[in-house]
Each structure stands twice: as structure tokens, then as C-alpha cells.
Image (tube, grey):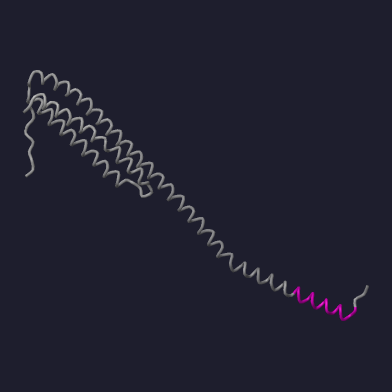
Amino acid sequence: MQLKPHRYEHYNTTLRDLLQTITTLIRNYVSTLKSHTPNLITQANRLWELRQRHRLVIGYQIHTVLCCRQSQLEALDEIANNIADFERTSNELREEAQEETQSSELTTLSSWTAWLLETLNVLQTQAKYLELHTRSMQPMAMESTTVKRFRKDLQLVKEYELNICMGIAKAERQQPGILPPVATAT
């Protein structure tokens, strides 16, 4: 079936216009793609660089937290050893004090009390130093609950202080005047 010449001409011009439009669109797409490709490569390189920096920062933070945790554990072990030594020495001194109380040697009990107070002061100073030192080593990402729990662990000294005070009070009750007078603030 043959087309009429005016229909043929109409389809032919329509097809030619469409092909020219498609060709123009393809050329515009290719030129746009060529103009944006360097920008896309730059953006991709920037994203890769940011990802690498992010990985380095995360690795550094994890390393810092692990180092801080390790130093805290070492310090806590040292304090635990000091407390164990203190308990052992305190028990030995209590036994000696009981023997010496029976033999009424007052000067030894006074020196023992002074040593206990000095040892307590040293342990409190070590705990305070450790607390200050860990604050400076503490990364910003560490949770406050971890810090509170660590501070709570450092308060073990208070229980021993109460035990020492109780022992001193018992010794004073058994032999009045055994301890030197306490200076009062005026």
C-alpha cells in the first residue's frame, strides 16, 4: 500500500525533525557528561580521602581508649597491691599492738598510730593523683558513667580509714591517755 505523497512528505519531515532533536539531545548529553566528569572524579577522590581520614581518626580514638584503659588497670593494680600491703602490715601491727598493749609500751602504739595515719595519707594522695592523672588521659568519647564508676572504685580508702579510726578508738578506750591529745581548731 502506497502512501499519498503529502502523507509521505509529512512523515518524512516529522521523522527528520525527531532525528535532529534526538541528535541534539545526545550531543548535549555527551557535552554535559564531559563537562561534569572531572567534577565527579574530584568529588569521588574527595570522598575517598575523607573516608581514609575517618578511618584514621577512628583507629586513633580506639587506640587512645585502649591505652587509657590499660594505664587505668595498671594504676588500679598498683593501688590494690598497696592496699593489700597496707592490710597485711596493719594486721601485723594490730597483733604487735595487742602484745605491746599487754606489756604497756605506750610509745610504740603512738608511733604505730602515726605510721597508720601517714600511710592513710599516702594512699589518699596516690588515689587523688591517679584521679587527676586519669582525667588528663581520658578521651572525650569516654562515657561519664565509666568515670563515675572509676571514681567510686577509688573511694575504697574510706572504708579502711573507718577501720583504723575504730581500732584507735578501741585502743584509747582500753588505755585512756595512750594517744597524744588532738589539736582543735579555734
Q: Quadrant of residue 97?
A: top left
**118 or 183, nearer to the observer:** 183
Apparent side of residue 122 relative to residue 175 in the rendered image (left or right): right
- 34, 107: nearer the viewer: 107
Q: Residue furthest right?
A: 1
Residue 50 shown in magenta: no
Q: Main secondary structure of the magenta part?
A: helix
Q: Check the picture and name the quadrant holding the C terminus.
A: top left
Verify whether residue 6 appears in magenta: yes
- For residue 7, side relative to residue 80 (left or right): right
Q: Which residue is drawn at 42% across and 50% down?
A: 57
All told, the count of numbered labels is: 0
- Identify the residue at horizontal 8%, vertical 18% (top origin): 103
As drawn, which residue projects farthest toward the bottom? 6
Q: What stretch is highlighted in magenta?
A: 4-19
Say left or right for 98 vs 8. left
Which corner quadrant of the image does residue 130 belong to? top left
Residue closest to the eye, 142 or 36: 142
Quadrant assignment for the N terminus = bottom right
Q: Where is residue 7 in the image (x, y as percent from the top left)?
A: 86, 78
- Give the side of residue 175 with respect to residue 81, left or right: left
Percent of width and height locating residue 182: 8, 36
Whether 142 is drawn above or below 28: the answer is above
Percent across and percent down for residue 75 are 29, 37
When the figure is inspected, residue 166 is found, relative to residue 4, above or below; the finding is above
| Spot occupied by residue 74 in the image (x, y as percentages of width and height) | 31, 36
